[in-house]
Image (cartoon, rainbow, N blue to C red):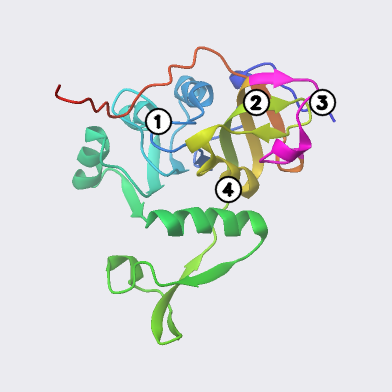
């Protein structure tokens, strides 16, 4: 089945106000830049965005935050975005901060059809407020529910016309998990090849999880924090 669409505009055409969207990536690595730019252009509002991070002020999800298109962020690491901080402290933005491992597992569970699971992460903190606690092997665990979304938007290094995807390096942290958990999954790729060209042993996301795929363009590949030696 050919799942190729022309571009981000066609891929995101039916994303509407108030929807829940998962966006892959880790820091600024492996984020769906073209699709985020399209959402900015569409001016959809009231979005609930599930993402490991919130981008930076002028890139990634920071572009949506800047235009107040996001109603709620479900995230793990948000320390590089001043606008995020401002909106959270002012009460303009709803925020659900989740331990990074729990966020990853909640996305994976959503894609695997597992409604909830127990984890020790977050016990004894604000994360555990209002959640069921049970003891396993003498250690308290809290109940975390799975996460799913109306759309999951991921970025891969290579993909084929049937939606099979290969990620590179750190982009594998969240993209494969989120690709499983969207009712509709959109994949943008750096290189799009005909079906059959990818080595089956190297595919990270099988095409069964992907409904739309397109070849992106003009990727910036920024470095979130550049660290150099003093000498």
Badge 4 or badge 3: first in the primary sequence:
4
Query: Which residue appears at 66% of the width and 22% of the height?
Result: 214
Mark drawn on residue 158: 2
Residues at marks 4 and 1, CA–CA distance in whole angstroms: 17 Å
Horizontal and vertical percent for residue 198? 75, 28
- Per the image, the residue denoted by label 4 is 177
Q: Nearer the viewer, residue 139 or 97?
A: 139
CA gap between label 2 and label 3 equals: 11 Å
* Residue picked out by circle 1: 28
Query: Of the numbered discs in the image, which one, if any, rests on residue 195?
Result: 3
| Residue 131 showing in the rendered view | yes
Query: Residue 17: x percent and y percent?
Result: 50, 36
Is the C-beta separation of discs 1 and 3 under 8 Å? no
Of labels 4 and 1, earlier in sequence is 1
Magenta stretch encompasses residue 202: yes
Helix, strand or loop at mark 1:
loop
Q: Is disc 4 placed on a helix, strand or loop? A: helix
Measured as percent of width and height from the top left, residue 146 is found at: 54, 61
CB contact under 8 Å: marks 4 and 1: no
Q: Nearer the viewer, mark 2 or mark 1?
A: 2
Q: Is residue 184 above or below residue 191?
A: below
Specify the quadrant that holds the N terminus.
top right
**Of callouts 4 and 2, which one flags the residue occurring earlier in the amino acid sequence?**
2
* Residue 19 appears anywhere in the view: no
Q: Secondary structure at mark 3?
A: loop
Q: Is residue 146 depicted above or below 94 in this figure?
A: below
Q: Is residue 123 above or below residue 193?
A: below
Q: Which residues are magenta?
A: 191-207
Alpha carbon of mark 4 to alpha carbon of mark 2: how far? 17 Å
Real-space CA distance between mark 1 and mark 3, rounded to the nearest whole angstrom: 29 Å
Q: Residues within 10 Å of mark 2 (few under 14, many from 20)?
A: many
């Amino acid at each position: 089945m050919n799942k190729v669409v022309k571009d981000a505009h066609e891929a995101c055409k039916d994303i509407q106000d108030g929807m829940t969207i998962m966006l892959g990536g880790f820091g600024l690595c492996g984020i769906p830049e073209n699709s985020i730019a399209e959402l900015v252009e569409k001016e959809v509002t009231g979005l609930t965005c599930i993402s490991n991070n919130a981008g930076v002020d002028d890139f990634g999800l920071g572009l949506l935050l800047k235009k107040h298109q996001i109603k709620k962020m479900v995230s793990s690491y948000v320390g590089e975005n001043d606008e995020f901080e401002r909106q959270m402290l002012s009460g303009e933005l709803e925020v659900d901060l989740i331990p990074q491992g729990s966020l990853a597992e909640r996305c994976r569970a959503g894609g695997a059809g597992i409604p909830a699971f127990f984890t020790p992460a977050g016990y004894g903190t604000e994360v555990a407020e209002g959640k069921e606690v049970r003891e396993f092997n003498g250690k308290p665990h809290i109940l975390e529910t799975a996460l799913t979304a109306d759309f999951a938007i991921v970025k891969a290094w290579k993909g084929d016309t049937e939606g099979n995807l290969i990620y590179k390096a750190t982009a594998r942290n969240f993209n494969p998990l989120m690709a499983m958990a969207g009712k509709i999954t959109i994949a943008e790729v750096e290189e799009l090849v005909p079906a059959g060209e990818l080595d089956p042993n190297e595919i990270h996301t099988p095409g069964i999880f992907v409904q739309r795929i397109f070849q992106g363009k003009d990727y910036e590949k920024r470095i979130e924090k550049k660290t150099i030696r003093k000498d």
